[in-house]
Every structure is written in structure tokens, then in C-alpha cells.
């Protein structure tokens, strides 16, 4: 008998019919002798509807009150799911985050989970209940309702799995697993049976939207066995996210090709090459609430250097404006930018033990005459910024070059 | 400086624009130096929508889970109201029933309030906040979410006013007060400046839908000054519901004419006139979940008697079926019924000290040749059952006969 945490996203509970489907699926797991904790999101569209109401009242709603309203989305789903399970003949009981309770800090709208009280859940499981816990929410030490931010239900599920030492945390989504790359770009893309936490983190941070990055970090930290599955397919085994040692011996060097289309590149030309310069450039960018992705600074010459970074395309104009001020302050030579760029990355723990992956990547891109504008590497990934028009071509050529279109 | 509890019903918070109006109204009360606690219902239609979702899942949803989902309606309103008050420059903070907490018993879907913890509210008021508390809901001693049943927000408001010893509990509705009778039937109907709790109770139980009957009982018991006001009219003083002694000296004998159109009458003919007979007839009726209104049993003759009662018209056929079984069991002579009847009542504490009110009423009805089928009296009301087609005529003639169309 195993204890399984199952998380269902908004599309999996988008209608009462889909909620009934989820209940039937849970009933099958229960019939196999498992204890099950179910963590649903709000019905898809519901969180946006609620936040829309708030915005009709106020352009900048109070975060505490925003959480009071936003948390009702999951509260509706847990009750409907419990009812649907009763219809399947299961014992089931629902809890809001505050009822559990899922203790968080007081950072409304993006709170962090501090602790989970497992007493009620353990008691209910022991009595044969399926326990349905609202994802995305908790309460702070004063009993104020908090939410974990968009995608927080994944984190709720993983945190519950960690707190209750569950045997597996299953994340049901509208895809049937993690792919070597986006199948819409490369039809030959294959579903991975396993992927390591580190690879998954890189994939997530590089734009693969299957799992919320915080939940992957959390699962890795607490050694929670995480599995991504489709809620619309009863057969598949999904993708298991493992610690590195558990991957099979004969593993590919590269596990996947990730990409991010919405990348814009900015460069401050000829800045004085002295300590503190990165902060003087990126400090004002951070103050303007612009997230920076890649940062590149090459060796300087003649006492100056060029400083480049990428931002989300939506922040491009704002970032340019900030840099104009910075330029004057630093007496830099100029500011240039390009918002027609994209980022393509090869990810795989295998590159740790296989030198030459970078050159293999660059050679593949060169064979198609794709010019590389920026390069950034980590221990298990290599990212390049290229012209946006080459995105699909680059992904396809890399997917093939690293043999990802062939079965393991 | 006074402490005011203001309850706003579903139509008063039906849209974000109306919610903004409520916030402006609260701001005016606050500007006059009052402390204000606001108790809203769910946006109109919302509770029905939520219960509709539950019914899509289950014909008989689990009551505990039904309360989890139903309570979200008010939770949305409190947050929106708090945000709207922030926009008016007020400090405001929302609480769900469970957060306050409003402690109830565990009778899900129709829980009763046991106790209200006033600590957080007092602290927030002292810090200058308007405190917004979700009506209709609470939590039991195990932290389960409960609701008080339809119209329970009135009860929440009165209970909060009692717990915090508020100076006044204002119930904002879509009418501007309590009328001598329904103005749609009698255009000359006048708004009452005051009415006693007992009269209000009789009016409510007789079909006047302004206030929920439990909240009036509660207010009477805890001596809460209750006022009914229109949320769409900024000027009116509404109707104050008082204890009897506070009513002015020169008061009318009758305060109002109430009526109930949906009345059906049933009679078991020739039942043995012996102890226990009422229970043998009404026991099976109660078991069939049929609410009985008036009950009449006259003196018997020849060892048998006729036993009559009225039920809501929707229960008429069901009640007839039950009585057929009862008839056989009791060896009664027959069962007759009529679902084309209605009830008209004259209500007033004045009749205590004025004999002859009944005969005055019967004479007025006789003058229009309206036949009285059943009569039932209490200390402060006289009700008659008549043919439904005479309803409007009876109400008008009584309204006039008791001088209700003239100013106090």
C-alpha cells in the first residue's frame, strides 16, 4: 500500500464532468489499495474571473484581500471533488489550506510554505478517506489567508507529499509527460520516461511550462518522487523526475532542447571596465521590476567593455529607457538592443561527463548558417541567443544532432 | 461615536458598481465618527450558481462539502468590499466566519451560532478599520466551515451586533422599510417608522419577507436595536424595530396586514375525538417533511371531530397522499382539501389592550361578503383563511378598516 499525492490542474477540473472523471481515476488508485491525497487547482478560468472582479474595484487591490478572493477558486473545487468521490462510493473530505493548516509566511499573493500540519490528514487517511486539499493556498500565523502565486498548486502538492512522506507525487496536466522538445516544433519529439530534477529545473527555467519551477526545487530538496502524467490518458506512465543516480546507465548526453521565444537582448557599449559596473547597470533594471535572464560580460579592452543581458520581450522598451539614463551616468558609449531574438538551450546531466557538447551544438547550428549572438552555459545546459526567425530550424537541427529523435 | 453593524443583502452587492456604492455609504457613516462593521451576503445569484455546480455532481451533496462551496460566495464579497473601501480612502479588513471566529454547532447548511470571538474585530476597530465580516457562515469547534442557511446573513449581523454591543444593527435591503402591507396590493400602504419585535416576528412568519425570522428572534432576545433601510435610498430612516415600551403612546391598534398566498387547507373529517389524535395525523405529515402552518380542531360531537390544517401549496398533493393512509388507520370519515385558499392576518400589539379587534375584522370582511373558512389567533394577531380570489380585496378592506392608510 502506497501513499500517493495527486495534483490536478485547472483544465483537469474545468467542468463538473471533468471533476467526475478525476473522481473515477482516484477511485481506481484507491481500489488498488493506495491512500490518496488529491490537490486540485481552481476550475480553469476561475482565478482570472475572480482577479478580474477585484480589478473592477481597484487597479491595485490590497494583496491580503486579493488572496481572500483568489483562494475561493480552489475552495469550490475541493468541495465538488469530495462530492464527486462520494458519488463513486468513496469516503472523502475536503480541506482549505487554512484548515489543514498549510502554514505560510505573510507574503500575500506569493507566500512560501513554512510548515504543514499533517494531523487531520493522517487521521482521515487512517479512517479510509480520500483527503482533498486545496492547492495554491495556506494561512499565515495570524490566520490570514495566503496564496502561493500562479502555479502554486504544484508546490502545494509537493509540500504535502514531503510532509506526509508520500511514495509518489503525481502531477496531472494536459500533456502526457516531459518531451525532448516541444512536439509542435519538432514532430519527432519523444516523451522522456525519466528526467533528473536538475534537468527539469533547467527545462522549466528555459520555458518548458510543464511544471512550476518552485515545485521542482521543492521536490528535489525533499527527495519527493515526482511524476508528470496526463489527466486525459488513463494508460500512460508519464515522466518520472528522479535524482541523478536513478537514471539508467546508458543515458543520452542531452535530454532535451528547450527554447524561449520571448527574449530581447540589450547591450551597453563601452562602459568603464571597473568593479561594481554590473550592479550599476542591473540595479536600476531590478528597481524597474524587470527580470533579467542571461547576462554576458566579456573581457574588456582599452579600459572599457560591453555589457549585455536579455529580458522578457514585454520589458524591452522599459529596459531601453532605463539604460538611456544609465548610459549618461556611466558615460558609456551607447545602448543597443534587439527584440527579435530567441533563446535555444540543450539540457542534459550527461554533458558533465562528455566534453565537446558545446562544440557539437555550435557545429550543428553553423551547418545551417545560424549565427550565434550570445552564449551562456551552466553545468548541465548550454544556451544560445539567435535571431528569432531561426528558432524552429535551430531546435530541429539540435534535436537531431543529439539523437533525441531516436528511442533510448 | 456609535458602533454600527450594517448588513447588505445580495442585491445590494450584486455588481462591482453596487459594491462601490456600499463602500461610499460606509465612508459617510465613518466620516460621521462611527465605527462600522459591515456584513455582506453573496452577490445575488452566486449562492444559487454554486449550489447548482454541486447539484451537477450529486443529487444529494454532502452537507459538509456543500457548506465549503456555498461559503465562498460571501468570501468573494468581503474581499471586494474591503478593496472598495480602500479606494474610498478607508482602512478596512475582511474576515470569513471561520477567521473571526463565528463559532457554530455542526448542523451543516443550517448551523446555529453559539459564540462570536470579538477580539480581532475590536482590535481592528480600535485601529480605525472598517471590519467586513462574511455573513451566513461560521465554523464549528473542529474548524469545519458551516453555513447558517438561507437568509443567514441577517442572523450573522444581529449576532455580531449582540456580541459587540453595537448601538444599532442596520439591515439594508431593496425596500425602504416595513410597510403596513404590501404596497403592490394596497397603493395606500405606508412605511412604518417603528414596529415591535413581536409584530415583526408575526409579520415575518406570515409571509412578509423583509427580514429573516431567526434574526428578529435573535435581535429581540439580545435587545439589539434593529433597523431596516433601503440600500438604494440615501435619505430614508427606514423602520426601527423596537421593544414594545419604546413605541409611542398614541399607537395604532393594528400595525399591519400580512398575507400568504401559497396556502392550502386540508381536513380529516370524522376522526375519533380522543387524546393523541393530533399527533397521529400530524406525525406522518412531519415525517414527510411537510411544514404545517395553521392547525384548527373544533369541539367534537358524537365522539368524532374534524381536524384541519394548512400547508404550503407546493406540499398539498403530498399531504393529501399522506392523509389517505392516515384516514384508513384512524377509520376517519374522509379527507377533503382546497389549494385555492390564502391567509390574511392583522397584526398589532395594540390588540392586547383593545378588545373587539376580531369582530371589527370579521365585520369588515363580511361587508364585502368574503367568507371566512378558518380562524386562528395569537395574542397580537388574527389570521383568517379565505378563498384565494378574495386576497387583494380582503387586504385592502382591512387596511382601510384599521385606518392604516392614514398617517400616524
Image (spheres, coloured by chain):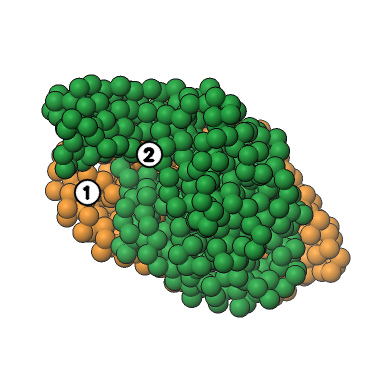
Chain colours: A green, B orange
Tell me what residue is drawn at x 68 percent, y 76 percent: A1
Looking at the image, residue B211 sits to the left or right of residue A281; the answer is: right
Asked if one can make out residue B340 in the rendered structure from this viewpoint, the answer is yes
Cα distance in 3D space between marks 1 and 2: 42 Å
**Marks 1, 2: nearer the viewer:** 2
Q: Give the class, few, some or many, for how many residues have Cα within 10 Å of label 2's Cα (few <14, many ≥20).
A: some
Disc 1 and disc 2 in contact, CB within 8 angstroms = no
Residue drawn at point x = 52 percent, y = 26 percent: A370
Residue A175 image point, x, y percent: 65, 45
The answer to which quarter of the image holds residue A239 is: bottom right
Secondary structure, mark 1, is: strand
Foreground pick, A146 / A328: A328
Question: Which residue is denoted by mark 1 in the rendering?
Answer: B129
Q: Label 2 belongs to which residue? A: A293
User: Residue B96 location in percent, x, y?
Assistant: 39, 55
Image: A366 above or below B274: above
Amino acid at each position: 500500500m502506497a501513499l500517493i499525492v495527486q495534483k490536478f490542474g485547472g483544465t483537469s477540473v474545468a467542468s463538473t464532468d471533468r471533476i467526475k472523471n478525476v473522481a473515477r481515476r482516484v477511485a481506481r488508485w484507491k481500489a488498488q489499495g493506495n491512500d490518496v491525497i488529491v490537490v486540485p487547482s481552481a476550475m480553469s478560468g476561475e482565478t482570472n474571473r475572480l482577479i478580474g472582479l477585484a480589478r473592477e474595484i481597484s487597479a491595485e487591490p490590497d494583496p491580503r484581500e486579493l488572496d481572500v478572493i483568489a483562494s475561493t477558486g480552489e475552495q469550490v473545487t475541493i468541495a465538488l471533488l469530495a462530492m464527486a468521490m462520494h458519488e463513486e462510493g468513496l469516503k472523502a473530505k475536503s480541506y482549505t489550506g487554512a484548515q489543514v493548516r498549510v502554514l505560510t509566511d505573510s507574503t500575500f499573493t506569493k507566500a512560501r510554505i513554512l510548515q504543514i500540519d499533517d494531523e487531520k490528514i493522517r487521521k482521515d487517511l487512517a479512517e479510509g478517506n480520500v483527503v482533498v486539499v486545496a492547492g495554491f493556498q495556506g494561512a499565515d500565523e495570524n490566520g490570514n489567508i495566503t496564496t502561493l502565486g500562479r502555479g502554486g498548486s504544484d508546490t502545494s502538492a509537493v509540500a504535502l507529499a514531503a510532509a506526509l512522506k508520500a511514495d509518489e507525487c503525481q502531477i496531472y496536466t494536459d500533456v502526457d509527460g516531459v518531451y525532448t522538445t516541444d512536439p509542435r516544433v519538432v514532430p519527432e519529439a519523444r516523451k522522456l520516461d525519466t528526467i533528473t530534477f536538475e534537468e527539469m529545473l533547467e527545462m522549466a527555467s528555459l520555458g518548458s511550462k510543464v511544471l512550476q519551477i518552485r515545485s521542482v526545487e521543492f521536490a528535489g530538496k525533499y527527495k519527493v518522487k515526482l511524476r508528470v502524467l496526463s489527466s486525459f490518458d488513463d494508460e500512460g506512465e508519464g515522466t518520472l523526475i528522479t535524482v541523478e543516480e536513478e537514471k539508467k546507465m546508458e543515458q543520452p548526453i542531452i535530454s532535451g532542447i528547450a527554447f524561449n521565444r520571448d527574449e530581447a537582448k540589450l547591450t551597453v557599449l563601452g562602459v568603464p571596465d571597473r568593479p561594481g559596473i554590473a550592479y550599476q547597470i542591473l540595479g536600476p533594471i531590478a528597481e524597474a521590476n524587470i527580470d533579467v535572464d542571461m547576462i554576458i560580460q566579456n573581457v574588456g579592452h582599452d579600459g572599457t567593455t560591453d555589457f549585455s543581458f536579455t529580458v522578457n520581450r514585454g520589458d524591452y522598451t522599459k529596459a531601453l529607457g532605463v539604460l538611456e539614463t544609465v548610459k549618461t551616468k556611466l558615460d558609456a558609449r551607447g545602448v543597443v538592443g534587439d527584440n527579435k531574438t530567441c533563446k535555444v538551450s540543450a539540457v542534459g546531466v550527461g554533458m558533465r561527463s562528455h566534453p565537446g557538447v558545446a562544440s557539437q551544438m555550435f557545429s550543428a547550428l553553423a551547418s545551417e548558417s545560424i549565427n550565434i549572438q550570445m552564449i551562456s552555459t551552466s553545468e548541465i545546459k548550454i544556451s544560445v541567443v539567435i535571431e528569432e526567425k531561426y528558432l524552429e530550424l535551430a531546435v530541429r537541427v539540435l534535436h537531431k544532432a543529439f539523437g533525441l529523435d531516436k528511442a533510448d
